[in-house]
Image (cartoon, rainbow, N blue to C red):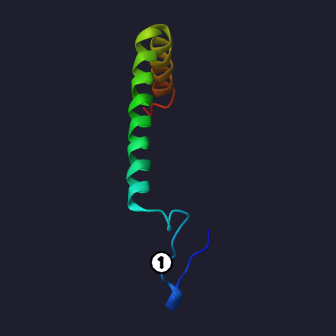
Amino acid sequence: MTEVTGEDATPRPGPQGDISPEEVREHLRRRAVFLRELAEARELRRRVTPHRSRRARIHAALRRRTFRIN
């Protein structure tokens, strides 16, 4: 990435510079749906496979104990 400084510091349109507001709204709507479904899938996975959740909790606790400073 290049840094623009001085008098030429005008904002340049990015890759989305020439899309309409409707397309932006549609993109944001699809992104929100995707993120919502992703959160649902994570929650379902957590409930369906509790042994993984338990293992993850145990490993996280072990990591916390490992880096504890006395």
Residue 51 vertical position relative to residue 34 in the rendered view, above or below: above
Looking at the image, which residue is at 51% across and 19% down? 59
Count of marks, rendered view: 1
Judge left or right: residue 47 versus residue 16. Answer: left
Give the amino acid at mark 1. Pro
Compared to 24, does 37 lie above or below?
above
Residue 45, horizontal then vertical, whole percent: 46, 16
Q: Single out the residue that lies furthest toward the right.
A: 1
What's the residue at 41%, 49% (across, down)?
26
Q: Quadrant of the C terminus?
A: top left
Q: Nearer the viewer, residue 45 or 29?
A: 29
Q: Quadrant of residue 39?
A: top left
Q: Is residue 26 above or below residue 20?
A: above
Q: Residues within 10 Å of mark 1 (few under 14, many from 20)?
A: few
Q: Position of residue 15 (x, y in %)?
A: 56, 64
SS class of the residue under badge 1? loop
Who's the residue at 50% across and 67% down the image?
18
Point out the image quarter for the N terminus. bottom right
Residue 9 pos. (x, y %):
50, 84
Q: Which sits in the foreground, 62 or 36?
A: 36
Q: Which residue is mark 1?
A: 11
Comparing 31 with 60, the one in front is 31
- Residue lying at 45% horizontally and 21% vertically, measured from the top left: 61
For residue 46, what is the image quadrant?
A: top left
